[in-house]
Amino acid sequence: MALYLMTGLIIVFLFLLLLLPFYYVYKLRMIFHRYLSSESIKGKVVLITGASSGIGEHRAYEYAKRRACLVIVARRENLLREVAEKARKLGSPDVVPICADVLMVDEDCKRFVEEAVNHFGRLDHLVNNAGISSMCLIEDATDITRFQPVMDVNFWGSIYPTYFAMPYLKRTKGSISVNASASAYMHPSGFSIYTASKAALLSFYETMRSEMPPEISITIATLGLVESEMTKGKHLNREGTTEVSPELADTLINQLPAMSTSACAKSIVEAVCRKERYVTEPKWCAVLFLLKAPCPGIIEFVNRRLHLRVKASVAKNFSMPPPENRSA
């Protein structure tokens, strides 16, 4: 048995030894090709969800500077109209703001995709940007069922628009981009449900690469600390309601420098136009990804230290309800 195992390992090693040089030469050629042949999106139609603030807002501006036609979607109509006006000034030939909720499947998701196609006659890029955050140790949650919106918005809020946009993207050989998170790889304490929602996104869109025609490119953005409402402390708290807590954000998030929203948006749009499979921002997050593979214990140690900081912060600023007052 040991002989068969050793023979198999030798065969695999030799196969990799012969194959890997050709594979990496191919990868280098593809990298140079992508950098030299970025897609022109002038006049193309881009649909962006979660476009009223943060990364979604600034991605609208980046596409506008490239003279793309925009369909921007969000729930906050007043902010959406302000973004639309600024995008027009930056160079977009036509901007259509649509007030909608990504969780309303037929009422909103199907409607805003169809409105985009009816208005422009095509759809070239789908930007899945809508998302919310939760900052809470799972043991501190008073009603665990109230965290369902995190999975609903972050996961299904991207899946629904993708489902309805697929037929139109096939016609134009278009692009899909989605905002995942570095937390899906690093698993920081205090973000368990948020992390799970972003990990689900990663798995879904990796599977989609093999299910969709290769002409449709999929770019997954694994984002770390980027200036946004989240880094200012906006989140679902332990009761499952939205609040803004700069103190908790300082404990959980703002221990490392955050990248500017505009710089992050520009990097993502450039990666999408080059049809990159992944884009990671800030770049130092990629170093942590590489560190985790050979040294998972180091990352776990850091996360445990963060866990202690979170517990101390919660104990200082909040009082926990007794177990009998928690909802299942």
Image (tube, rainbow, N blue to C red):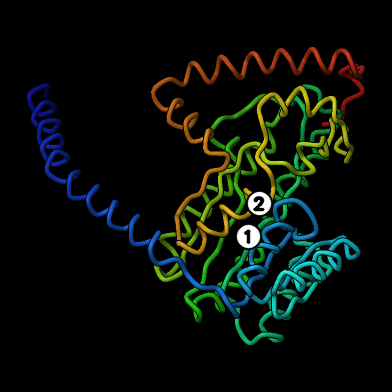
Label 1 Cα crowd, 10 Å radius (few <14 / some 14-19 / many 20+): many
Q: Pinpoint residue 129: horizontal percent, then vertical percent.
A: 68, 56
Quadrant location, the N terminus = top left
| Placement of 244 over or under 42, stated as above or below | above
In space, the residues marked 2 and 1 are separated at their CA atoms by 6 Å
Mark 2 residue type: Phe
Q: Residue beneath label 1, please?
A: 159
Please give the name of the residue rendered at 56% of the width and 30% of the height, measured from the top-left corner: 186
Quadrant location, the C terminus = top right
Please give the name of the residue rendered at 45% of the width and 62% of the height, measured from the top-left corner: 275
Q: Pinpoint residue 195: horizontal percent, then vertical percent.
A: 64, 37
Q: Pinpoint residue 90: horizontal percent, then vertical percent.
A: 72, 69
SS of the residue under disc 2:
helix
- In the rendered view, does 85 fall on the left or right side of 47? right
Label 2 Cα crowd, 10 Å radius (few <14 / some 14-19 / many 20+): many
Q: Badges 2 and 1: C-beta atoms under 8 Å apart?
A: yes
Q: Nearer the viewer, residue 184 or 68?
A: 68
Mark 1 residue type: Ile
Q: Residue beneath label 2, please?
A: 155
